[in-house]
Amino acid sequence: IAERSAPLRGQNVATADGTNVSVLANIALAVEAQSAFAHGADGVGLFRTEMLFCERSQAPDEDEQYQAYSEVLRQAAGKKITIRTLDIGGDKPCEFLNLPKEENPFLGYRAVRMYPQFHEIFTTQARALLRASAVGPLNIMVPMVATLAEIQWLHGQFAHIAQTLQQEEIPVGEWHLGIMVEVPSTLYLLEKAANYLDFVSIGSNDLAQYFLACDRGNPHVRHLYDYRNPTFLALMRDITQRAQAAGLAISLCGEMAADKQMLPLLIGMGLTQLSMSASAITPCKEALTSLDVQQCQQLIEAAIACDNSEQVLELIGQFMRAQS
Ligand code: PEP
Ligand code: MG
């Protein structure tokens, strides 16, 4: 990290006109938390827990998971931490579950859709997470949610598991429940979801794949898989605004958050929590300090009015040149 960046490392940043923005880290292992904080992360916006489960012959037990989650919360020392429940299936296989091969894995049996059948694995993770909340405030986030029924089920499950822990006299601290917004249907669920959830986080990697109907790993459709597409930007803006109107906290944790060219658009949409790989944090904080929210709002509206991504990039180029 360059010397000139040092002052931004340990502190929250604001745009030039004073809007505070949290710049958080995406991590995949508990040990990465320390380096994320050393890179200036204001918290962890996405702890992907798949690594704990994959490439082994059986699922980690409650204590092993509790150790991993509570280590991150200890390192955080009160900073915001969001841990995501298991997101297996699709492009993320898991040996010990012995799942049959599917023709359309991305549209198939994945993540939250598996929890009722693999209920013990789900409950064990939920117990470990809720126990870890005694170490520090914890956001628990569930991937691949598509329906209100899933949200209601999750709400009931977590409430029940928390109550069971209390009956066992096991301490549970402050925790909040949220979902990834990565299936387009969730846009129209946000108002109803707010009765059950505290926050949502846009998973732009999957959201773009499902919105534009193109496999995120297929090179033949790479040209379509584009988060700069004006229709996708309109979707993101609408999600952000509807979530805020419904009283849900909202963040972005897909790769798009680390793309510096996208930053003024994200700020223009109204996002104030961005989660990205640790190495992108300091450059993002630096870029944020020179942005003006009102100008960013005008930019996102102009970007949405564009015909295609090339025009969007041209517009961003002009915006950046005008700033420097
Ligand atoms: C996403 O889909 O944007 C996301 C952050 O989750 P993952 O890349 O792990 O599917
Ligand atoms: Mg995803």
Image (cartoon, helix red, strand yellow):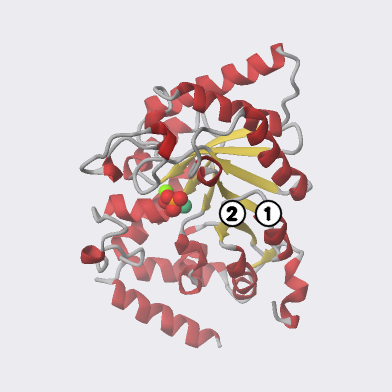
Q: In this view, does 324 lie above or below 86?
A: below
Query: At which x and y percent is residue 209?
Result: 31, 54
Q: Point out which mark residue 33 bears.
A: 1
Decide if ligand 1 comes within 8 Å of the CB at mark 1: no
In terms of depth relative to the viewer, which is nearer, 58 or 309? Answer: 58
Please report the residue visible at 61 percent of the width from the left and 39 percent of the height from the top.
Answer: 139
Sequence order check, earlier mark of 2 and 1: 2
For the C terminus, the quadrant is: bottom right
**Would you say 235 lies left or right of 200 here?**
left
Q: Position of residue 205 (x, y in %)?
A: 39, 56
- At 52% across and 21% down in the image, what residue appears? 157
Asked if one can make out residue 182 in the rendered structure from this viewpoint, the answer is: yes
Q: Residue 231 carries which label?
A: none
- Label 1: element kind: helix
Q: Residue 135: percent from the left, percent from the top? A: 76, 36
Image position of 120 with respect to 259: above or below: above
Q: Do the residues labelled 2 and 1 touch (CB within 8 Å)?
A: yes
| Total marks in image | 2
Three-letter code, disc 2: Ile
Q: Name the residue under label 2.
A: 27
In the shown orientation, is residue 209 left or right of residue 268?
Answer: left
Amino acid type, callout 1: Ala
Task: Tell me if residue 263 comes above or below residue 203 in the rendering.
Answer: below
Left or right of 319: which side holds 290? right
Where residue 227 sits, quadrant-wise, is bottom left
Residue at 45% across / 32% down in the picture?
A: 193
* Residue 229 image point, x, y percent: 30, 65
Q: Residues within 10 Å of mark 1 (few under 14, many from 20)?
A: many
Label 2, label 1: how far apart the Cα atoms are: 7 Å
> Of all residues shown, which one is farthest toward the front?
57
- Ligand 1 contact, mark 2 (Cβ < 8 Å): no
Question: Regarding mark 2 in the picture, which secondary structure is present there?
Answer: strand
